[in-house]
């Protein structure tokens, strides 16, 4: 069985409250050996921390998601810095970023929290998990200002030019369910031709199900379906894809270099 690393899963979501243990069991049966749990608001941090301490293969990321910008307060940034030094540490800062697709986005406030989290990540020597929807050029500009910062653009949906600009910065591209849809030709072409050493697999559970699971709650056990599709697009074995993307995720998130400064 191949071993997969789900680089983005919201296992703390209420959608999993009724059967979270069964979801984890199915993930294990499917070969998912590690998962990153990114946060959305300060209220989500304790649950993510508890899950990560209960299960050694779950790894927390703490951040303030732009879609919940109305809930974030400036003191949450101070709380984020303190959280990094609590038991268990953090694999990354995130989910953070910019979202200009949501109705009436407060762009100025989003920028403030995004740039502040980039600063925290750089100081702590942690990677960032970046949400970039209808704002990728601005995200690119922000990342260029933070030399040496590492991370992943979650659920990448940009152009080929934007993809290669991110790769030049050393950023990874996270791909999940959308790449399995035949109409996503631009995304599928990027998945087929980008350097494999910068690709991460993700489910974004409980959202973004693959084409065979559309309309249903997504979960980590669906990750191999994404691997099958990308391996087919690239003309390589599923085993090679699983192995390399697992190494990629370990390199980015679990390297000892990613431990925050004391």
Image: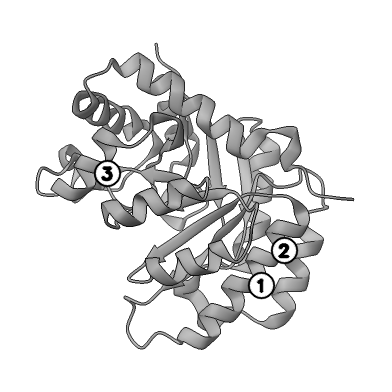
Q: CA distance from mark 2 to mark 1?
A: 6 Å
Closer to the camera in the image, 19 or 77: 77
- Location of residue 116 (image quadrant): bottom right
Residue density around tag 2, few if under 14, some if 14–19, many if 20 or more, within 10 Å: many
Q: Is residue 197 left or right of residue 38?
A: left
- Location of residue 76 (image quadrant): bottom right
Q: Is residue 150 left or right of residue 99?
A: right
Q: Is residue 19 above or below residue 112?
A: above
SS at badge 2:
helix
The tally of labels here is 3
Q: Is residue 27 left or right of residue 256?
A: left
Residue 251 position in % (x across, y down): 60, 32
Residue density around tag 1, few if under 14, some if 14–19, many if 20 or more, within 10 Å: some
**Residue under circle 2?**
120
Residue placed farthest to the top in the image?
Answer: 1
Closer to the camera in the image, 72 or 54: 72
SS at badge 1:
helix
**Residue under circle 1?**
116
């Amino acid at each position: 069985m191949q071993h997969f690393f789900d680089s983005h899963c919201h296992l703390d979501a209420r959608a999993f409250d009724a059967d979270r243990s069964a979801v984890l069991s199915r993930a294990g049966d499917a070969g998912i050996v590690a998962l990153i749990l990114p946060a959305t608001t300060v209220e989500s941090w304790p649950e993510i921390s508890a899950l990560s301490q209960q299960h050694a293969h779950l790894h927390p990321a703490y951040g303030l998601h732009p879609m919940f910008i109305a809930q974030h307060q400036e003191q949450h940034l101070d709380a984020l810095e303190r959280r990094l030094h609590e038991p268990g540490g953090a694999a990354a800062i995130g989910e953070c970023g910019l979202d200009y697709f949501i109705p009436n986005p407060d762009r100025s406030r989003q920028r403030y929290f995004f740039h502040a989290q980039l600063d925290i990540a750089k100081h702590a020597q942690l990677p960032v998990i970046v949400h970039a929807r209808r704002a990728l050029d601005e995200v690119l500009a922000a990342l260029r200002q933070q030399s040496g910062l590492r991370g992943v653009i979650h659920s990448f949906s940009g152009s080929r030019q934007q993809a290669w600009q991110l790769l030049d910065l050393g950023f990874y591209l996270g791909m999940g369910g959308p790449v399995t849809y035949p109409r996503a030709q631009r995304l599928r072409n990027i998945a087929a031709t980008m350097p494999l050493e910068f690709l991460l697999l993700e489910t974004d559970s409980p959202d973004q199900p693959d084409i065979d699971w559309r309309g249903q709650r997504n979960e980590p056990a669906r990750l191999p379906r994404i691997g099958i599709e990308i391996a087919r697009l690239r003309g390589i074995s599923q085993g090679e894809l699983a192995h390399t993307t697992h190494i990629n995720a370990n390199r980015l998130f679990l390297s000892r270099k990613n431990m925050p400064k004391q």
